[in-house]
């Protein structure tokens, strides 16, 4: 299974898709229900327009590198390896996450998933991991 961004035709706001083999649908839906996670709909990917898209978008600003996952963005200063900006999303914990992480060195900063439990926090965790992968080897 993979978590990806929904295709444009299925976007409703802050959302993600879980991509899984169609044969596993009943088990996946049961697991989501057991974890009290609401599934808006199940759509078979039959059309290229319904193909899920990558969650990651990377922007190179020279000294700064920004990674976006879904609606959350994290930017690091390549010279100091300090997190200089966190933005995006619409969850109430985004300002808290920004205050806690901005100014910290990327390699020693706490992982966002230890600071919150929202979809924005999950997206920031993915961006954080991708940024670490791209800058720390």
Image: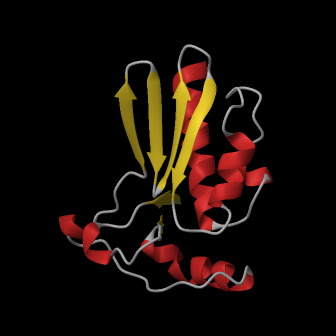
Query: Height in image: 4 above or below 137?
Result: below
**Toward which corner of the image does residue 45 lie, by quadrant?**
bottom left
The answer to whether residue 137 is seen in the rendering is no
Percent x, y for residue 92? 65, 69
Q: Is residue 62 shown left or right of residue 102?
A: left
The residue located at (35%, 74%) in the rendering is: 11
Tally the marks: 0
Query: Height in image: 72 above or below 21?
Result: above
Percent x, y for residue 49? 20, 67
Q: Residue furthest top?
A: 79
The residue located at (45%, 35%) in the rendering is: 66
Query: Height in image: 36 above or below 8?
Result: below
* Observer-nearest of 36 and 103: 103
* Observer-nearest of 23 and 46: 46
Q: Is residue 52 shown left or right of residue 87?
A: left
The answer to whether residue 78 is seen in the rendering is yes
For the C terminus, the quadrant is: top right
**Colour scheme of the rendered structure:** secondary structure
Q: Residue furthest left?
A: 48
Percent x, y for residue 81? 62, 21
Percent x, y for residue 103? 68, 32
The residue located at (51%, 57%) in the rendering is: 2
Q: Is residue 107 shown left or right of residue 58?
A: right
**Toward which corner of the image does residue 96 lie, by quadrant?**
bottom right
Query: Height in image: 11 above or below 134?
Result: below
The residue located at (73%, 65%) in the rendering is: 117
């Amino acid at each position: 299974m993979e978590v990806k961004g929904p295709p444009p035709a299925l976007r409703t706001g802050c959302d993600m898709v879980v991509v899984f083999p169609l044969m596993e649908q009943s088990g996946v839906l049961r697991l989501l229900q057991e974890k009290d996670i609401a599934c808006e709909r199940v759509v078979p990917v039959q059309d290229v327009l319904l193909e899920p898209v990558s969650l990651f978008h990377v922007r190179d600003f020279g000294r700064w590198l920004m990674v976006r996952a879904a609606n959350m963005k994290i930017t690091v200063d390549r010279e100091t390896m300090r997190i200089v900006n966190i933005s995006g999303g619409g969850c109430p914990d985004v300002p808290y996450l920004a205050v806690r992480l901005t100014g910290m060195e990327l390699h020693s900063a706490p992982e966002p998933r230890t600071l919150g439990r929202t979809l924005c926090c999950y997206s920031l965790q993915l961006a954080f991991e991708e940024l670490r992968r791209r800058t720390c080897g």
